[in-house]
Image (tube, rainbow, N blue to C red):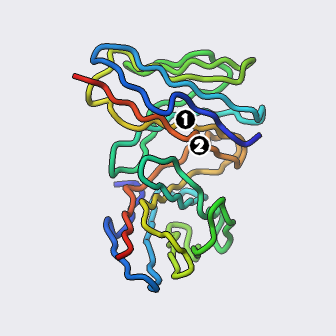
Amino acid sequence: QQQVKQSPQSLIVQKGGISIINCAYENTAFDYFPWYQQFPGKGPALLIAIRPDVSEKKEGRFTISFNKSAKQFSLHIMDSQPGDSATYFCAASGGQNFVFGPGTRLSVLP
Amino acid sequence: DGGITQSPKYLFRKEGQNVTLSCEQNLNHDAMYWYRQDPGQGLRLIYYSQIVNDFQKGDIAEGYSVSREKKESFPLTVTSAQKNPTAFYLCASSILTSGRENTQYFGPGTRLTVL
């Protein structure tokens, strides 16, 4: 119940396309869902986060969509750029519990 | 500047040696964490600490040890009992105040290589 599932494992998108990464959770006690971006050799950095009282949050080209009833959330990267090529981790947090998804490696082709 | 620092950036160890990785934060965060990341893989929790002088084992604690003598410091020792220690080690910290988002903030990482 503590797992967060993430798909796809890897994703290749053309420049200007939309990248979509999906995550699902089981534990209904989770109440905070951040996404992290990690470049090779660097630590993960917080990208965007959402609480379950909203269904969507947008920051620039990055949007989180949240479906509370399905216990699913997704990251959409609009107008994907080669500089977006990185590994993306979703996470779920509730109280003192914090769980990461296994990560998605995104490659944006020029 | 506020943040999390890890040192060294690169570390080489001979088999049979213990090594200690440093992690310091000046964010006044309550909790600190150590993760291990293998190439192309996700984050695996080694140890975490929610308060000074207390820490808990994560999923892969065998062969590692930690201490939390100060709020801002959480060093990780990789002992000779860790059979495959070559990996990228990440330290993180977070606030644990009730009602606040439990966001973890990461340091830049230490890459450990066993020779």
Near-viewer residue (B6 or A53): B6
Q: Amino acid at mark 1?
A: Cys
The structure residue drawn at horizontal position 55% and vertical position 56%, both measured from the top left corner, is B29
Considering every residue shown, the one lying at the far left of the view is: A110
> Measured along the vertical axis of the image, is residue A60 above or below residue B35?
above
Q: Quadrant of the C terminus of chain A?
A: top left
Q: Amino acid at mark 2?
A: Phe
* Label 1–label 2 contact, CB within 8 A: yes
Tell me where residue B55 sits by quadrant.
bottom right
Report helix, strand or loop for mark 2: strand
Q: Position of residue B37 (x, y in %)?
A: 47, 55
In the figure, is residue B7 to the left or right of B34?
Answer: left
> Measured along the vertical axis of the image, is residue A63 above or below residue B101?
above
* Residue with the mark numbered 2: A100
Q: Quadrant of the N terminus of chain A?
A: top right
- In the rendered structure, the residue with mark 2 lies on which chain? A
The structure residue drawn at horizontal position 69% and vertical position 66%, both measured from the top left corner, is B56
* Residue with the mark numbered 1: A90
Q: Position of residue B66 (x, y in %)?
A: 58, 74
Report helix, strand or loop for mark 1: strand
Q: Position of residue A77 (x, y in %)?
A: 41, 20
Tell which circle, 1 or 2, labels the residue nearer the N-terminal end: 1
Dot 2 crowding, Cα within 10 Å, few <14, some 14–19, many 20+:
many
Tell me where residue A34 sits by quadrant.
top right
Near-viewer residue (B14 or A39): B14
Dot 1 crowding, Cα within 10 Å, few <14, some 14–19, many 20+:
many
